[in-house]
């Protein structure tokens, strides 16, 4: 069929298109740098790459990156857990919905800088990035999970009840597979928000060891190549984390598919 021949070709050309797009924007960057003519304002790609390489061979670079990454991941994981719990409570209990939903909507709508400045009054600078990441992730996960719960197939749930599925089997075979796309999308969006808001919190609060602090110091001392180098580090880490989340979501989908398949297709009937 025509569709079966074009789609593999399209997938095969995607890496080439990505490389071509990267080369195009690097060329644009180089042209802009040459047009400005001042490394202080727009350093060339070569200068930034050399600066990044110089930073990458120092232990301080990896310690700083790992510390910021740990802060953001802690806030992200706490935000995911808080969002799931909030979604379960607000969809199950009216009182919880009346109390929690307006608060989460306010958090989602308010500028992240406002929360950073307010939280600086009560939270130590070292813990602020994790808290801000948590605060940005909770509404995203909550909203997506609420939509997923509302769109669950009630007929499937009734069938599971008729056939005597227990709580665990209903959760694993029906509820989790239906909610997984919503959860994966929320985690991908939440990770991006957590990373950006966590670095923004570091820029403002300036904890001793942090990527955001390095960005702010480089800007103060007019080390523009370092600003670009640290920004590239942030972008690359964000892309890597997103890939890891997508891989984990794919593995979870495969595990659920195997666990819920009939006996002749790789599953077992013993669970039924």
Image: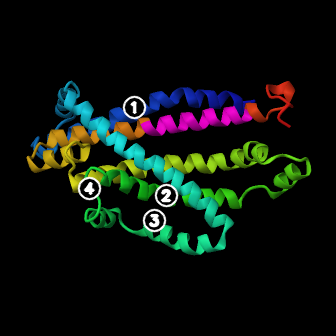
Q: Earlier in the sequence, mark 1 or mark 4?
A: 1
Is the C terminus in the top left, top right, bottom left or bottom right quadrant?
top right
Residue at image mark 4: 124
Q: Earlier in the sequence, mark 1 or mark 2?
A: 1
Looking at the image, is mark 1 or mark 4 nearer the viewer?
A: 4
Q: Position of residue 96 (x, y in %)?
A: 60, 70
- In whole angstroms, how far apart are the C-alphas of marks 4 and 2? 21 Å
Looking at the image, is mark 2 or mark 3 nearer the viewer?
A: 2
| Picture residue at 64% right of the left edge, 46% below the top | 180
Q: Earlier in the sequence, mark 4 or mark 2?
A: 4
Residue at image mark 3: 108
Quadrant of residue 132 within the rendered picture: bottom left
Looking at the image, is mark 3 or mark 1 nearer the viewer?
A: 3
Residue 150 visible in image: yes
The dot on residue 20 is 1
- In whole angstroms, how far apart are the C-alphas of marks 1 and 2? 37 Å
Looking at the image, is mark 4 or mark 2 nearer the viewer?
A: 4
Residue 141 visible in image: no
**What's the magenta region?**
241-257
CA neighbours of label 1 inside 10 A, class few (<14), some (14 to 19), many (20+): few
Main SS of the magenta segment?
Answer: helix
Residue 49 included in the magenta stretch of the image: no
Residue at image mark 2: 138
CA neighbours of label 4 inside 10 A, class few (<14), some (14 to 19), many (20+): few
Q: SS class of the residue under badge 2? A: helix
């Amino acid at each position: 069929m025509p569709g079966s021949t074009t789609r593999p070709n399209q997938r095969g050309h995607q890496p080439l298109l990505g490389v071509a797009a990267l080369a195009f924007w690097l060329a644009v960057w180089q042209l802009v740098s040459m047009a400005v003519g001042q490394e202080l304002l727009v350093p060339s790609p070569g200068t930034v790459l050399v600066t990044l390489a110089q930073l990458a061979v120092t232990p301080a670079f990896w310690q700083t990156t790992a510390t910021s990454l740990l802060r953001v991941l802690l806030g992200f994981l706490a935000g995911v857990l808080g969002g799931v719990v909030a979604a379960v409570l607000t969809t199950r209990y009216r009182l919880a919905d009346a109390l929690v939903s307006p608060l989460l909507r306010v958090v989602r709508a308010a500028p992240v800088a406002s929360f950073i400045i307010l939280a600086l009054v009560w939270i130590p600078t070292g813990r602020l990035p994790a808290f801000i990441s948590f605060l940005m992730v909770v509404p995203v996960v909550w909203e997506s999970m609420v939509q997923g719960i509302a769109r669950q197939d009630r007929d499937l749930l009734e069938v599971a009840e008729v056939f005597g599925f227990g709580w665990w089997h209903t959760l694993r075979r029906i509820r989790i597979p239906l909610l997984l796309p919503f959860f994966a999308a929320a985690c991908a969006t939440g990770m991006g928000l957590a990373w950006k808001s966590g670095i923004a919190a570091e820029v403002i609060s300036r904890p001793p060891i942090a990527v955001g602090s390095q960005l702010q110091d480089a800007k103060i001392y007019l080390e523009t190549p370092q600003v670009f180098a640290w920004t590239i580090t942030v972008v690359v880490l964000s892309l890597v984390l997103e890939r890891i989340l997508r891989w984990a979501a794919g593995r979870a989908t495969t595990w659920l598919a195997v666990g819920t398949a009939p006996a002749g297709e790789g599953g077992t009937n013993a669970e039924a």
